[in-house]
Image (cartoon, rainbow, N blue to C red):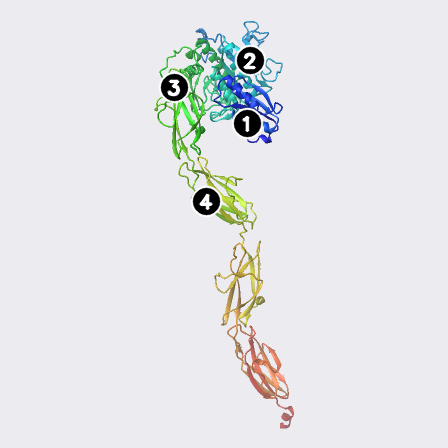
């Protein structure tokens, strides 16, 4: 059923009745009940197909649509689809002349051609003035099921197809059912034509219907839809539904409705060497009779092959599976005329069992190409049980629910009649053969086997050894969670996970969801950040500093989703801070242990911490400050400090070093000598020494009199300050002196003192 009815402005759709509704009276009753759920102004009957469990309705309100689809009588609702033509002699190749020589030409039968119409005025059809006129006219009926275009055939496609049908079965009649409106055919118009064919089967003895049209592609037998239901009803009524496989050049898929379970799908081969040919989507550099054409769709469930290139009929030469299909539709008319009591299944068995095996080199699949001469000559004696295949859930390896869908494909020379489905190795309850069936597996996780016993119209029944069977893993248990780790990076978070497991069907993939903040999503059913089989994922384009929480869930092969494991991370930049360290403004020496540090650091985020030490490693980080005082341990010598800067994310710089010499010891030596002279005192001293920073200068202080200045030259008058080792003090008085050496670090020695009186020049003069 649709889930988005509210979003639809046009609520026109096809409703299928429950599959248990098979007789016409019950169909009519159920359709009436459906239409009674809303007033006629809100629920309009567009089309009612009397022979089919289908009805086309138009709901003018949402309430009416919902009410209709909630009724028990409604099994499903479908959109109206559009199909296109599948457009590529051939009669000797399939043995038609030999069949005709034996009188097998389909006399008294008819083929419904659902196409673009048929130009019955052409000589190939008897130059008819109208359907059935004159009596030799090969077109017994013609009608537009699509909007009337006032043209017998506005394209030529249907005329060519009808010509091929009559080429195979010249004794048959064509029923020209125009279902095309321009280049496409609506599924509702096609279904209307099928419904007409079923209703008029007895009137015209309709052996088959030809649908050289299609759309899309499918790698498996299509699920039941309105077209498939209609084709199934036709086949059950005894009309062979022959459908072109499509011209998409696929070797693994065929188009719809050829993929329908009831459809007899037809692929194309060349009928002769016609040289190299190129088509819109492929080319064959060379060609030969019974070579599969490059454009023909193929798959393992394709039914049969027939000539499709190049086919000239009714004045047109065309190529395609459109031309292959009418060879088969015409063959069914021949078989119906020759063996009127046989079923569609028996006639199909004649064609498939006698056809020439042709290998498609694109996929290695072998399918029979019809051989009409052989098909009309075999004697219907059948002691062989049917053969077939069985798929569960379209070939899935596992299922999370015990309710599954079976696809059953089978064939038998005498025609299939019954089947019996079982979870064991024996079966007694047979039922009518269907292409699909809902089935319930034995409860409990594990590998389950389903077997289908087949029985033909003669009673031949498969055994447990020959019945089609297949297995599937039933896994209703969610996978076991593992662990998830999230590692933050610069605007990224790297996720890794491990340890997820599933004991039944195995882990197939993983799903990752995320939410901003520190709380992860509660499930993995929301918007998916990653889905795949890898066990790592990196989320990018995140905002640094904003936390992100993740949930990682495992999905097993059956489709069960685990509850998941969570992890949270905050993306951040990865670059460490950079900076400098300066001691005492860059001084080379210090005479005190306490020094002043200037710490300058930068970071793209911020600088949060620092660590200052004389060691080569550091663990004691403190809050970052641009300035601080550091006290060295006692003792002179060169000292090296190191600083590490750290940002809020823990990114830490390499150590940044700065050095300074600690010199707390004053110089030694420097003995002062004072010698009196005329009105002067000559002062000299020996050089001082300093083991640390070295002697920088000398300071000479003095006081008048005999009392020497204080230690370290802290008193007195500075007489000299420099690097020389002598000085002349001009004076005629008595002075006392102290000489102190000063080192580079600024330490001042205690000093050497000396008193001295200058000689009087008068005294010297009298002596002379």
Name which of mark 1 and mark 3 comes first in the sequence. Answer: 1
Dot 3 lies on which element? strand
Q: Nearer the viewer, residue 741 or 512?
A: 512
Do callouts 2 and 1 mark residues in contact (Cβ within 8 Å)? no
Query: Residue 309, can we see it?
Result: no
Neighbour tally class for label 1: few under 14, some 14-19, many 20 plus, Cα within 10 Å:
some
User: Which percent across, then down, holds residue 653?
Assistant: 52, 57
- Marks 1 and 3: which is nearer the front? 1
Q: Nearer the viewer, residue 210 or 226?
A: 226
Q: CA distance from mark 2 to mark 3?
A: 37 Å
Q: CA distance from mark 3 to mark 4?
A: 53 Å
- Give the vertical position of 516 relative to 760 (above or below): above
Name which of mark 2 and mark 1 comes first in the sequence. Answer: 1
Name which of mark 1 and mark 4 comes first in the sequence. Answer: 1
Neighbour tally class for label 4: few under 14, some 14-19, many 20 plus, Cα within 10 Å:
many
User: Which percent across, then down, holds residue 262?
Assistant: 47, 20
Q: CA distance from mark 1 to mark 3?
A: 37 Å
User: Which percent across, then down, holds residue 549?
Assistant: 52, 46
- Give the vertical position of 708 relative to 617 (above or below): below
User: Which percent across, then down, holds residue 599?
Assistant: 57, 62
- Marks 2 and 3: which is nearer the front? 3
Give the labeled residue for mark 3: 455
Do callouts 4 and 2 mark residues in contact (Cβ within 8 Å)? no
Give the labeled residue for mark 1: 69
Dot 2 lies on which element? strand
Name which of mark 3 and mark 4 comes first in the sequence. Answer: 3
Q: Is residue 42 left or right of residue 330?
A: right
Name which of mark 2 and mark 3 comes first in the sequence. Answer: 2
Q: CA distance from mark 4 to mark 2?
A: 64 Å
Give the labeled residue for mark 4: 497
Q: CA distance from mark 2 to mark 1?
A: 35 Å
């Amino acid at each position: 059923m649709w889930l988005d009815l509210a979003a639809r402005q046009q609520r026109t759709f096809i409703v299928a009745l429950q599959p248990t509704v098979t007789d016409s009276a019950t169909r009519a009753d159920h359709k009436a009940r459906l239409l009674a759920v809303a007033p006629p102004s809100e629920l309009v009957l567009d089309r009612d197909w009397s022979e089919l469990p289908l009805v086309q309705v138009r709901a003018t309100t949402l309430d009416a649509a919902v009410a209709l689809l909630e009724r028990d009588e409604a099994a499903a609702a479908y959109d109206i689809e559009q199909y296109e033509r599948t457009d590529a002699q051939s009669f000797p190749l399939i043995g038609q002349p030999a069949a005709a020589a034996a009188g097998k030409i389909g006399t008294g039968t008819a083929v419904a051609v659902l196409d673009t119409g048929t130009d019955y005025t052409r000589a190939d059809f008897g130059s008819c003035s109208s359907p059935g006129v004159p009596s030799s006219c090969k077109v017994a009926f013609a009608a537009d099921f699509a909007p009337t275009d006032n043209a017998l055939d506005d394209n030529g496609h249907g005329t060519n197809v009808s010509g091929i049908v009559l080429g195979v079965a010249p004794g048959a009649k064509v029923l020209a059912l125009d279902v095309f409106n321009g280049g496409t055919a609506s599924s509702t118009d096609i279904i209307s034509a099928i419904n007409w064919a079923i209703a008029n089967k007895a009137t015209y003895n309709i052996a088959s219907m030809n649908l050289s049209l299609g759309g899309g592609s499918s790698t498996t037998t299509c699920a039941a839809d309105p077209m498939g239901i209609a084709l199934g009803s036709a086949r059950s009524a005894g009309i062979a539904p022959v459908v072109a496989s499509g011209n998409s050049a696929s070797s693994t898929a065929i188009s719809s409705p050829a993929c329908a379970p009831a459809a007899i799908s037809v692929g194309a081969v060349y009928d002769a060497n016609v040289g190299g040919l190129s088509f819109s989507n492929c080319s064959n550099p060379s060609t030969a009779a019974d070579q599969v054409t490059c454009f023909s769709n193929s798959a393992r469930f394709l039914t049969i092959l027939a000539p499709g290139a190049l086919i000239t009929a009714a004045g047109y030469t065309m190529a395609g599976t459109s031309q292959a299909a009418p060879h088969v539709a015409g063959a069914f008319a021949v078989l119906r005329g020759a063996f009127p009591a046989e079923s569609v299944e028996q006639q199909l068995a004649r064609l498939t069992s006698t056809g020439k095996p042709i290998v498609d080199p694109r996929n290695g699949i072998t399918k029979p190409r019809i051989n009409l001469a052989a098909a009309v000559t075999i004697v219907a004696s059948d002691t062989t049980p049917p053969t077939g295949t069985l798929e569960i859930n379209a070939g899935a390896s596992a299922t999370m629910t015990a309710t599954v869908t079976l696809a059953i494909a089978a064939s038998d020379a005498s025609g299939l009649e019954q089947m019996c489905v079982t979870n064991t190795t024996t079966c007694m309850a047979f039922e009518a053969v269907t292409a699909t069936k809902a089935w319930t597996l034995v409860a409990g996780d594990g590998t389950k086997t389903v077997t289908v016993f087949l029985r033909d119209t003669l009673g031949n029944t498969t055994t447990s050894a020959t019945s089609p069977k297949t297995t599937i893993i039933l896994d209703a248990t969610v996978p076991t969670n593992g662990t998830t780790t999230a590692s933050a990076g610069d605007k990224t978070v790297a996720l890794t996970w491990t340890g997820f497991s599933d004991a039944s069907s195995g882990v197939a993939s993983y799903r990752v969801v995320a939410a901003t903040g520190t709380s992860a999503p509660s499930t993995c059913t929301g918007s998916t950040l990653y889905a795949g089989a890898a066990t790592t994922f990196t989320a990018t384009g995140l905002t640094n500093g904003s936390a992100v929480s993740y949930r990682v869930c495992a999905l097993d092969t059956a489709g069960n989703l685990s509850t998941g494991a969570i992890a949270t991370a905050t993306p951040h930049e990865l670059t460490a801070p950079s900076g400098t360290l300066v001691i005492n403004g860059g001084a080379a020496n210090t005479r005190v242990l306490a020094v002043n540090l200037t710490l300058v650091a930068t970071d793209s985020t911020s600088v949060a911490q620092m660590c200052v030490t004389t060691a080569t490693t550091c663990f004691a980080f403190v809050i970052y400050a641009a300035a601080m005082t550091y006290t060295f341990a006692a003792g002179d010598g060169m000292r090296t400090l190191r600083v590490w800067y750290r940002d809020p994310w823990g990114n830490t710089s390499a150590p940044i070093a700065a050095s300074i010499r600690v010199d707390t010891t004053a110089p030694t030596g420097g003995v002062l000598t004072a010698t009196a002279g005329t009105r002067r005192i000559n002062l000299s001293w020996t050089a001082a020494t300093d083991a640390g920073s070295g002697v920088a200068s000398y300071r000479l202080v003095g006081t008048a009199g005999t009392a020497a200045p204080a230690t370290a030259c802290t008193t007195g008058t500075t007489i000299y300050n420099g690097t020389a080792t002598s000085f002349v003090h001009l004076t005629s008085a008595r002075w006392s002196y102290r000489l102190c050496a000063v080192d580079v670090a600024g330490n001042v020695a205690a000093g050497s003192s000396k008193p001295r009186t200058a000689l009087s020049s008068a005294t010297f003069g009298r002596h002379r």
